[in-house]
């Protein structure tokens, strides 16, 4: 984990230069939509304006944020959700149970929590608007356990944000650079290093943003998208056409180690911009990503990984999953 003041090493210099350059492209592109009838109303949105379904809200400097949804994120971040303590206790016990079960199989285990945009940019968040972020959030409670298998790169990203932008403006997800430094925190905890940022290649693609879709479906953003270091194969679509259950196998014959990883996660792992699964492929020969917050122990026995990782966005911890066991 990073700590203290940074020296402007090669990684930080690259981040500072490329991040602001890509932000300029993002801003200029948005201005080009000004005369487009489909997107004209989007450019007139004000701080605090909500999407029609109430799930997205306008913050400062043109940033969009998740508002609420089934996870009641706005309540969580202010410490007002009634289930914060009980869910935190359930999740902590779940993580300990996973560690025990997997260690009995000779498998290493890590749990990754991706910080929400409000946690890294509270000064821009309409969900806070001057209110201090509650440390009763589940991620904070879990972090206090100081478990050596838990990875929550909040402090890393907070220290980095003065050098460049880590989140897309109209998206709830980290951009390429935020994804890189979060993945770097993950692999460091596992005892590895990623290639330097200048060696990790990306291409610019036009892609819709998850939050601007709520306001202007025709809007897209040109953003850096990580070039996979090997090959990836879709093994199965999600259940009933959704995301949950999707399986992607990532292979890299030039990886640092021949170890295999089974990764259960969400969009922060899958994300084509800078998903954790792709970054892990620089290190591990095979990474099987399963879009789910549950561990499927049947799949663990079938795939026979050296390492199992569970990953989840911070807001989803309010609803602890129930793993799939052989004795169920």
Image: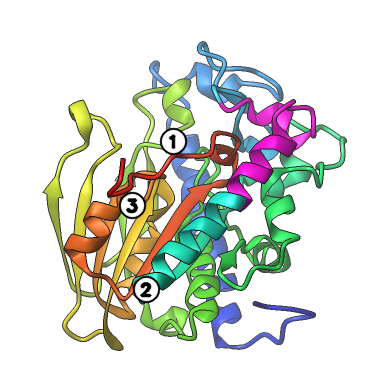
Q: CA distance from mark 3 to mark 1?
A: 30 Å
Quadrant where the C terminus is found in the figure: top left
Q: Can residue 120 be seen by looking at this rendering?
A: no
Magenta span: chief secondary structure:
helix
Q: Judge left or right: residue 277 versus residue 173.
A: left
Badge 3 density bin: few <14, some 14–19, many ≥20, Cα 10 Å: many
Identify the residue at image location x=55%, y=43%. Answer: 169
Q: Judge left or right: residue 81 versus residue 240.
A: right
Out of 207 and 298, give the one closest to the viewer: 298
Q: Earlier in the sequence, mark 2 or mark 3?
A: 2
Q: State the residue position of label 1.
A: 32
Q: Secondary structure at mark 2?
A: loop
Q: Earlier in the sequence, mark 1 or mark 2?
A: 1
Q: State the residue position of label 3.
A: 270
Q: Can residue 36 be seen by looking at this rendering?
A: yes
Q: Secondary structure at mark 3?
A: helix
Identify the residue at image location x=19%, y=77%. Answer: 252
Out of 98 and 245, give the one closest to the viewer: 98
Q: State the residue position of label 2.
A: 107
Q: CA distance from mark 1 to mark 2?
A: 51 Å
Q: Judge left or right: residue 65 versus residue 186.
A: right
Quadrant where the N terminus is found in the figure: bottom right
- The x and y percentages for residue 202 are 33, 67
- The x and y percentages for residue 3 are 74, 78
Q: CA distance from mark 2 to mark 3?
A: 23 Å
Q: For the residues carrying marks 1 and 2, which lies nearer the camera in this image? A: 2
User: Range of the magenta residues?
Assistant: 71-92
Outermost residue toward the front? Answer: 327
């Amino acid at each position: 984990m990073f700590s203290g003041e940074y020296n402007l090493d090669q990684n930080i210099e690259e981040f500072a230069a490329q991040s602001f350059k890509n932000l300029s492209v993002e801003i200029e592109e948005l201005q080009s939509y000004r005369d487009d009838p489909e997107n004209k109303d989007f450019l007139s949105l004000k701080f605090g304006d909500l999407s029609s379904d109430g799930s997205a809200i306008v913050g400062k400097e043109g940033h969009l944020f998740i508002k609420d949804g089934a996870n009641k994120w706005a309540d969580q971040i202010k410490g007002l959700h009634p289930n914060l303590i009980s869910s935190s206790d359930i999740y902590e016990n779940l993580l300990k149970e996973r560690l025990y079960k997997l260690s009995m199989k000779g498998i290493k285990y890590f749990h990754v929590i991706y910080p929400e945009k409000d946690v890294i940019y509270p000064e821009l968040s309409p969900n806070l608007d001057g209110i201090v972020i509650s440390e009763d959030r589940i991620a904070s409670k879990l972090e206090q356990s100081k478990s050596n298998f838990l990875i929550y790169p909040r402090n890393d990203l907070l220290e980095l944000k003065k050098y460049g932008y880590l989140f897309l403006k109209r998206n709830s997800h980290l951009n390429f650079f935020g994804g890189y430094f979060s993945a770097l925190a993950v692999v460091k905890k596992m005892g590895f290093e990623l290639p330097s940022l200048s060696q990790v290649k990306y291409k610019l693609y036009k892609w819709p943003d998850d939050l601007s879709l709520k306001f202007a479906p025709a809007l897209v953003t040109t953003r850096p998208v990580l070039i996979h270091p090997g090959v990836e194969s879709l093994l199965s679509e999600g259940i009933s056409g959704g995301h949950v259950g999707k399986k992607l196998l990532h292979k890299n014959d030039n990886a640092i180690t021949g170890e295999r990883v089974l990764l259960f996660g969400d969009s922060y792992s899958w994300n084509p911009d800078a998903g954790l699964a792709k970054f892990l492929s620089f290190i591990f020969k095979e990474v099987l990503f399963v879009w789910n917050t549950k561990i499927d122990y049947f799949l663990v026995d079938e795939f026979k990984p050296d390492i199992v990782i569970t990953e989840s966005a911070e807001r989803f911890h309010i609803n602890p999953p129930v793993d799939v066991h052989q004795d169920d």
